[in-house]
Image (tube, helix red, strand yellow):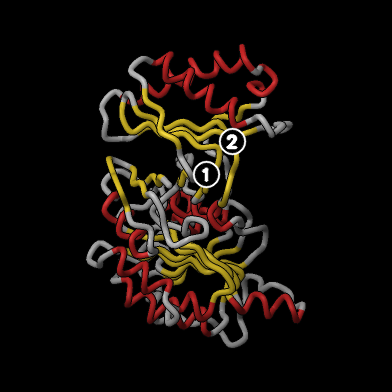
Amino acid sequence: MLATCQAGYEDSLAGEMAANGWLPSGRGPGWVDCVGGPGGGPPELAFAPLILTEPVLLQADAVNALAQKAVDYFAGSLRDERIGNAWPNLWSGSPGVGGLPRRVAATRQAFDELLRRKLSRVARLAAPGVPPGVGPERGLFVVFTDFDRAWVSRTAILGGQRRMADDPSAPSRSFLKVEEAYGVLGAEPGADEAVIDLGAAPGGWSYSAARRGANVLAVDNGPLKAGALGNPRIEHRREDAFGFRPPQGRTFDWMFCDVVEEPHHVLRNLVTPWLEGGWCRRFVVNLKFGRTGPVALLQELRAAGSPFVRHAASFRIRHLYHDREEFTVVGVAASALQDAREDRPCGSHGE
């Protein structure tokens, strides 16, 4: 497989792969590859927004020659397959090679023209860009690692990371993280759902939920700003997030947590009590790994003693496009399944 990552996180991705039994065989800016693993499909990798499975290396010096090889590969793979729906046509390049984006764009344009001549109906169904969602996709996925080298595959595994559009009313860039996290989870706050935002200031995550019609309780001693300040759907309590506990019998539909603290402190004193207590149904938690080894932290988060393993029905860990030295963990609390079995109504804002 060949997995991509943000530039500068190649060692972390390689370490995560090795920890899962997939030993890296090569790497470059924004990518790591591997010739084999312990069997089965590739593992879920926090650092990889895109994993090409069984990639094939195409090499050529000229743009048209490389495009022709990509067309030949793609057309040859269609011998026993009929495409009747839109298919992802995703091209990208190593971020560490100067001028490579222009090379990728030129080769893709040449590929599109050649494919239209050869398979016009199939070409019309091509869908450029990163497909939404998480999991396996079938289409054409091309990753350039140099001007004359491109890895291609018909199948890829998407991590769900993607660049999000900013909002001028958002109080901070952290707004982009939670917007991206919804896509990884496959859910977002709905109208009149109850959201607790622990460590809310300046209010980017609270604003994100409120603009979807959710009712937010923002807990932070710091001030809210911009679109979160004075928002009728946001109640601000100037309290320490670590000391806040919900009233007896209160359950929130969502728990947000993005605090600048050591990750083990956050896990012990915020995540564990909220999940163990069944005080929320879904969660989005950001954990900073700047002073902690990211691969070691990943192993802890996935270990049997992790609060996510013990108290979540499902969860995903990602190094998001908009994350820096941090992970974002999204999931569904185990208590949500119990609520569904008992057919209990969702909590609402207010007591």
Residue 281 located left or right of residue 80: left
Looking at the image, the residue that sits furthest to the bottom is 248
**Residue 223 place in picture, x, y as percent:** 37, 62
Q: Position of residue 187 (x, y in %)?
A: 61, 57
Q: Amino acid at mark 2?
A: Gly
> Of residues 43 and 312, which is closer to you in this image?
43
- Image: 114 above or below 209: above
Dot 2: few (<14), some (14–19), or many (≥20) neighbours within 10 Å? some
Furthest residue to the left? Answer: 291
Q: Give the image location of residue 44, x and y in percent.
A: 47, 59
Q: Say if mark 1 contacts mark 2, CB within 8 Å.
A: yes
Q: Is residue 29 left or right of residue 227?
A: left
Q: Secondary structure at mark 1?
A: strand
Mark 2, residue position: 139
Numbered circle sitting on residue 201: none
Relative horizontal placement of residue 312, taking residue 8 as reference (left or right)? right
Q: Earlier in the sequence, mark 1 or mark 2?
A: 2
Q: Residue at x 68, y 80 (%)?
A: 338
Residue shown at 61% from the left, 11% from the top: 117
Crowding at mark 1 (Cα within 10 Å: few <14, some 14-19, many 20+): many
Query: On screen, 118 above or below 137?
Result: above
Tag 2 secondary structure? strand
> Is 272 on the left-hand or right-hand side of 190?
left
Q: Quadrant of the C terminus?
A: bottom right
Kindly identify the residue that appears in the image at 39 percent across and 76 percent down: 267
Image coordinates for residue 342, horizontal then vertical, percent: 75, 81
Distance between mark 1 and mark 2 Cα atoms: 8 Å
User: In this view of the protein, which residue sits in the foreground, 149 or 309?
Assistant: 149
Residue 156: mark:
1
- Quarter occupied by residue 77: top right
The disc labelled 1 sits on which kind of residue? Ala
Residue 234 in view in this figure? yes
